[in-house]
Amino acid sequence: MADEKPAMTCGIDLGTTNSAIAFIDEHGKAQVIQNTDNERITPSVVLFEESEVLVGKIAKNSAVAAPDRVVQFVKRHMGEEGWVKNFFGKEYTPETISALILKRIVQDAETVSGGKVGSVVITVPAYFNEVERKGTQDAGIIAGLNVVSILNEPTAAALAYGLDRLGEKKRVLVYDLGGGTFDVTIIEIDGTKIDVLATDGERRLGGIDWDDEIINLVAEKFQAEHGIDPRSDVEACQDLRNKAEEAKMSLSKLDKVRILCQCKGKSTKVELSREEFEKITKGLLDQTETYLGVVLEKAKLSWKDIQTVLLVGGMTRMPAVVQMIQRVTGIKPETGINPDECVAMGAAYYNAVLALQAKPSEEPELALAGEVLKEAMDEEVMILLQGVEVTNVNSHSLGIVGIHKKTGKVVAHKMIPKNTPIPVEITKPFGTEKADQASVIIKIVEGESENPEDCTEIGTCEIKDLPKGRPAGSLIDVTYSYSVDGRLQVTGKDRISGKEARVEIVRSSGMDAKEIKDAQKDLVQVEVG
Ligand code: AMP
């Protein structure tokens, strides 16, 4: 059809509690696309019915009535081995459930915009490890999407913020506290160069933990009054969870709230002031404060070197967060960006950057999308995006398990230390253990400890068919190559024969290629509403 709209260049913020999608409009600006409920963010909540799956507001509202058929906060389990849910005889992994969320978001975006979602960039917390990144990418593939990159959330936020303010050189601190994850990142924006200087955080710290404090306080009062713990009743507990979250959000505006807890025909009303709320959650906020110092130190900077603080994630609407950051950094956080939307917008911009910079000989499809963008886009914006360069750092050390030559101890040797600018390729030689060794198994680990037991094994790879007659200690050059989207490739090269073994990592957890394909086929048949 001659007047068919070109596919949209999109960015998706796949959040723990909420998700959002943005596209690049005809002027080259990122715009959030509403869902079919006329909302700009969609709860990342899934309700399983016999004949269909519901995602979003309805699923969230059903959490009380049908808690055992609702899945929330699945992002916290991304890539987790053995985490599966069973509904109506079907097994769902974190990746397949995330794919259902993506499917609904994309479906809605297409319905509302009347266009087609083309390539997508999906964001992840900066602190996500290799397995969690791979899980996110797999979720996109299962949903049938063309995932061109995985981008760190703070980088996306900085991109959305920075594109309007280019020309100024500044260092930006991104404090991202969402529903389930937390990270702090220091980024330098210089012209169209965006460099991540340091990043750190907790993959399991977020709004849910603040909600839990309220739940515990109310439940204990209820128990003291009625002798029943509402947390042990699934429905009452879910109801209390919703009310705790509402109370937390109201306390960002009001001085006090009342929470009605109901269980087994009994009820208790608890009054909670902002002051008391801040007192019971102080430990959580303090944890985030510690990371501010850690990241500043890692970037080898002091607060006077930082010009801007960006707040990302719904939790940053809490006055206590703003006050703490202002007290520690001496900087009033920027209010010009929407903490719920800037990540999806930044992801869409990054997708446009990749498309505009793609070489037709290497990435024909993406380059074609770039051509389509160029035709419509304002020239000024196009030149800007074409010049964008993003340099990231890795958030976890990547190592190899080996035997220490002198001590004979099994150690995790760091190949790419944490906070190394990426993309990076590092090669180090390792000796074979025995004479005539035919194969070498490389154990890949992630973590900061020298002890392999304290690290996470993310996979292994094997260099096979080594030439015969080699003595013990024959050298194998092992190369770790880490791409901008935080994905790892491992290569081993035998020094004597020059034989190279580029090896696909066999991952310790997550899904393999066949499982992804099967899940993709399965998902096509699932009705998502
Ligand atoms: P995100 O993952 O960025 O969507 O953030 C979601 C988290 O932010 C949830 O835990 C929400 O309860 C929380 N949140 C959203 N709005 C507010 C608010 N006004 N005050 C406090 N927390 C909020």
Image (cartoon, grey):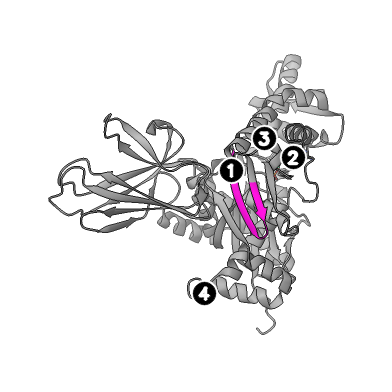
> What secondary structure is marked by label 3?
helix
What residue does disc 3 label? 208
Q: Is residue 46 visible?
A: no
Q: Please tell me whether mark 2 or mark 1 is closer to you in this view.
A: 1
> What secondary structure is marked by label 1?
strand
Mark 4 or mark 3: name the one nearer the start of the chain. Answer: 3
Distance from mark 3 CB to nearest ligand 1 atom below 8 Å: yes
> What secondary structure is marked by label 4?
helix
Mark 2 or mark 1: name the one nearer the start of the chain. Answer: 1
253 left or right, relative to 490 = right
209 left or right, relative to 461 = right
- For residue 160, above or below residue 266: below
Circle on res. 316: 2
Q: Please tell me whether mark 1 or mark 3 is closer to you in this view.
A: 1
Q: Position of residue 379 (x, y in %)?
A: 72, 74
- For residue 274, above or below residue 117: above
Rendered image quadrant of residue 497: bottom left
Quadrant in the picture for the C terminus: bottom right
Q: Residue at x 78, y 46 (%)?
A: 334
Quadrant in the picture for the N terminus: bottom right
Q: Is residue 422 visible?
A: yes
Q: Amino acid at mark 4?
A: Pro
